[in-house]
Image (tube, helix red, strand yellow):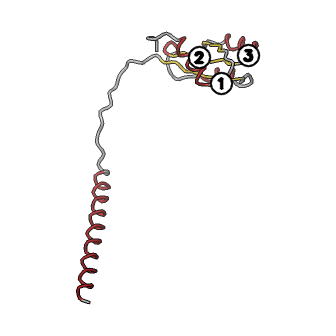
Amino acid sequence: MTTLYTILKVLQYIFLVYLGVSAIYFFLYAFIAQFPRKRKISQSDKKNKFVVLIPGYKEDQVIIDVAAEALKQDYPNELYDIVVIADSFKEETVAKLKELPIIVNEVFFEVSSKSKSINATLASLPNNKY
């Protein structure tokens, strides 16, 4: 009986040590997290040129409003371009889009997909412009 009691007591201490080490581990990480590192953020006045791709498939009803809203960026107009990827749009929709100061890229596929449209448009854009 005493050997069984001793074995259970040893197992109890091992379990207690395991839980104690786990608790100390979590406590240390929680304590260290209260003192965040100060990261250096480089401030640069240089603004990069970028392109906004708006793919659409038969979205004639909403695409003109989406393109007009995309032009309302809080960024210098000469440093970004809006490209609407027109896949299966009506001719009058494409004509209205071309009136806006955006780039309209019409794509035609037998079986359309968003990835095909985006890849075709990216292939048609200049390499070092954006």
Q: Dot 2 corresponds to which residue?
A: 83
At mark 2, the secondary structure is strand
Q: Secondary structure at mark 3?
A: helix
Residue 7 shown left or right of residue 129 in the figure: left
State how far apart marks 2 and 1 are (Cα).
11 Å
Residue 123 x, y percent position in the rendering: 53, 13
Q: Which residue is mark 3?
A: 93
Q: Using the image, tell me which numbered label, if any, was put on residue 66.
A: 1
Identity, as a three-letter code, of the amino acid under mark 3: Thr
Q: Earlier in the sequence, mark 3 or mark 2?
A: 2
Task: Please state which of residues 122 and 28 is positioned toward the viewer in this rendering.
Answer: 122
Q: Residues within 10 Å of mark 3 (few under 14, many from 20)?
A: some
Mark 1–mark 3 distance (CA, rounded to whole Å): 13 Å
Residue 100 percent across, percent down from the top left: 65, 13
Circle nearer the viewer, 2 or 1? 2
Q: Is residue 45 above or below residue 29?
A: above
First reached walking from the N terminus: tag 2 or tag 1: 1
Q: Residue at x 69, y 18 (%)?
A: 110
- Residue shown at 30% from the left, 67% from the top: 19
Q: Which quarter of the figure has residue 82?
A: top right
Which corner quadrant of the image does residue 28 belong to?
Answer: bottom left
Please give the label number shown on residue 106: none
